Image (cartoon, rainbow, N blue to C red):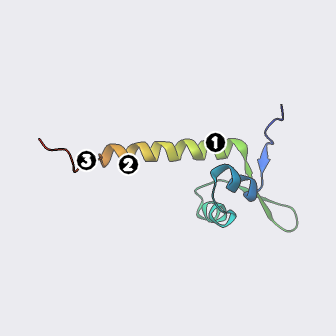
């Protein structure tokens, strides 16, 4: 079994989230997803635990949204 690396590239994060690297970069630049810049070329890295925290926050936001905006089935008649 291969352990998850501590730090992930933006491409790695995009793969986990099933989105583009550009979208992940935007999340990082907006401060939504904490990351660090390393090396002389300033490559971004996201700590695995920060990604898991971000995912948990997004689940909570979705839960709150659903609670505040209940689905109303238009086919249901009283």
Going from the N terminus, do you reach mark 3 or mark 1 first? Answer: 1
Q: Is residue 48 above or below residue 20?
A: above
Is the Cβ of the residue at disc 2 closer than 8 Å to that at disc 3? no
- Name the residue located 74 percent from the left edge and 58 percent from the top edge: 11
For disc 3, the neighbor class at 10 Å (few under 14, some 14 to 19, many from 20) is few
Q: Is residue 33 left or right of residue 57?
A: right
- Label 1, secondary structure: give it: helix
Furthest residue toward right = 40
Mark linked to residue 52? 1
Q: Position of residue 22 (x, y in %)?
A: 66, 67
Whole-number angstrom distance, CA of label 1 to CA of label 2: 20 Å
Residue under pointer 2: 65
Residue under pointer 3: 73
Picture quadrant of residue 21: bottom right
Whole-number angstrom distance, CA of label 2 to CA of label 3: 17 Å
Going from the N terminus, do you reach mark 1 or mark 2 first? Answer: 1
Mark linked to residue 70? none
Going from the N terminus, do you reach mark 2 or mark 3 first? Answer: 2
Depth check, mark 3 against mark 1: the one in front is: 3
């Amino acid at each position: 079994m291969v352990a998850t690396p501590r730090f992930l590239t933006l491409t790695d994060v995009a793969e986990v989230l099933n989105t583009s690297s550009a979208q992940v970069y935007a999340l990082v630049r907006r401060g939504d997803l904490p990351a660090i810049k390393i090396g002389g070329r300033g490559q971004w890295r996201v700590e695995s635990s920060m990604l898991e925290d971000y995912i948990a926050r997004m689940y909570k936001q979705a839960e709150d949204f659903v609670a505040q905006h209940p689905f109303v089935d238009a086919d249901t008649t009283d």
